Image (cartoon, grey):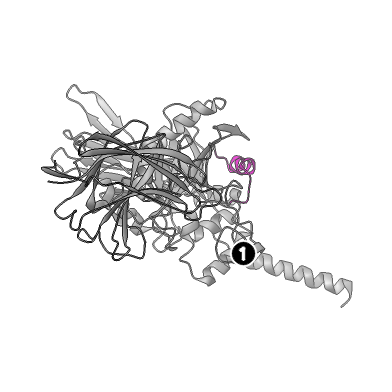
Amino acid sequence: MTPRRLLIALAVAVSGVILAAWWLAPPARTVLASVDDPRHVRGAIHVHTTVSDGAGTPGEVAAAAQAAGLSFVVLTDHGDATREPAPPRYVSGVLVVDAVELSTTGGHYVAIGLPQAPYRLAGEPRDVIDDVTRLGGFGIAAHPDSPKADLSWREWQAPFDGLEWLNADSAWRDEPRRVLARALAAYWLRAPETIVSLFDRPGRTLARWDALSKRRRVVALAGHDAHARIGPRGDWEPADGGYSLRLPSYAAAFRAFSLAVTLSSPLSGTDAARDARLLIDSLRTGRVSTVIDALAGPARAEFTAAVTGASGDRVSYGEGATVPAGSAVDVKAALVPLVRGPEIRLLSDGVVVARSTEGQVSFVHDSGRSPAVYRVEALWPGAPGAPPVPWIVTNAIRVGFATPRATVPLLASATWERPIPVVPWVVEKHAASTVQLTPTILTPTNTAWTMTWTLGGGAPAGQYAAMAVPLPRGFLTGADRISFNARAAGPMRVSIQLRSSVTGRRWLRSVYLSERAGPITVALREFTPAVASDPGPLDLAGADSLLVVIDTVNTAPGSAGETWVSEVRVEGA
């Protein structure tokens, strides 16, 4: 073939690819008139960088966010929170906040606003959530209904602060290969629109959110889960030194959708620490909506509930608020900018109670009406998905709920107790670890045991240090809790374990210790199997050993410390 014919053939081939991409590509986004308000900012959350398994540096991520018109980005690299987070800073004019995605036994938890943790945050969801709360953070259950079982959230009774109603990395995983192939071809022409073309309305997740919101405030938002890379198996790392595609890019992901956050005051643009506090406070209190910008934008929904007081004054509440019971409440939503055509749906407890295509909608919650949770979904005509993904999703306003009562105790007051027999505890440990036990007799029936320990160093490989005491046969029968006093040389988590010497089965419950000695009570029904494949409940009759264990779930290899335990007993109501 002559060079001229080769060039003609190449041109024809390229033209064919371009025409095919044009034919396969979804419609271009609709550009709306911008309505500037410095208290309303757009940004992205759940973003990975080269600090963990992302393809870009924090600086490259900030540059992509700036190009997409975002004001902030929250980085959430994988970790255990023991890495000191980078301070909030402005990069390329974008507020960059360093957060972390934690791994629990029940799913991933994105924690924002944490300081450096004094020990590894890992283990059961309830314990990780407790630690995040204690350290002052705000946590989000990530990709809760992911088609990948190891990514989905599995502990729905845990008191997490928020959840991702949409996760961009999970939304495409239930699509057939032909749809993904078409998206790959169209991506090069309209990347943001192509990403969104793989979204559906996640009805199951939204229904879970509606149900949870009847009991407490749960903040819902969309997470980008952006890595800017994907391997041949849909993972974020190249396969065994192989390749990965750098897509979807950070820029495309940030243009696909964004979070519309309402701040109590505008960002300064210079004081990053102050601005980060403003942002995290708005996220924590639910003053945040999700907007699918690849459909239309920039846009947001103004969502309020107003009450007229006895003196005639008008009090207005916004997203995330709880409106006290009593007076009638005017619930309203309006698109900003005001656009006619898209349908606005006002939902009460997940059921549509009002709708409009005129750019605004309203509903009156009468004073005699039962408490209800209101939120808004706006639908853009022709949106992709079956059912279509919502264009805008606001957070909820809870109306008519009484002030939350104090937490109901897990256990009733104990009516009897049985001290652990006064016998020596013994050391159990990994070969590379060291343990020393020192007894201190406090009373004839109460000996305090000090365990001085060092875990073996290196990579985590089952290192542990423990103290154990035998229990008489049937010692736990009739009991509903284990109580003791304890402290540690520094903040830490230890594993309280029960074991059967006959079957080898173990059950455990993690507890937090501080430098100050204090009482700790653990309900026996909270103990879970130490081996995930063991579905059996705690065998009260068969458990014949009690252990206090330090292991690499919450303690780094090579760590050393001291743990003090006394007055160990079982109790019952």
Q: Which residue sits furthest right?
A: 2
Q: Which residue sits furthest left?
A: 415
Between 261 and 209, which is closer to the camera in this rendering?
Answer: 209
In the rendered image, which quarter contains the N terminus?
Answer: bottom right
Q: Is 529 in the magenta?
A: no
Q: Residue at x 28, y 46 (%)?
A: 213
Q: Which residue sits furthest bottom?
A: 1
Q: Which residue sits furthest top?
A: 311
Q: Is residue 43 at all visible to an observer of this figure? A: yes
Q: Is residue 132 at all visible to an observer of this figure? A: no
Between 26 and 339, which is closer to the camera in this rendering?
Answer: 26
Q: Residue at x 66, y 62 (%)?
A: 241
- Where does the image place residue 15, in percent across and percent down from the top left? 72, 67
- Please, what is the three-letter code of the amino acid marked with disc 1? Ala
Between 481 and 363, which is closer to the camera in this rendering?
Answer: 481
Q: Residue at x 56, y 35 (%)?
A: 86
Q: Residues within 10 Å of mark 1 (few under 14, many from 20)?
A: few
Is residue 32 left or right of 214 when viewed as pictured?
Answer: right
Residue 119 is drawn in which quadrant? top left
Q: Residue at x 59, y 51 (%)?
A: 54
- Where does the image place residue 10, in percent across and percent down from the top left? 78, 70
Q: Is residue 136 above or below residue 477?
A: above
- Where does the image place residue 20, in percent across and percent down from the top left? 64, 68
Residue 418 is drawn in which quadrant? top left
Q: Mark 1 = which residue?
A: 239
Magenta-colored span:
54-70
* SS for callout 1: helix
Q: Is residue 464 above or below residue 97?
A: below
- Where does the image place residue 183, in percent across and percent down from the top left? 56, 64
Between 348 and 567, which is closer to the camera in this rendering?
Answer: 567
Residue 311 is drawn in which quadrant? top left
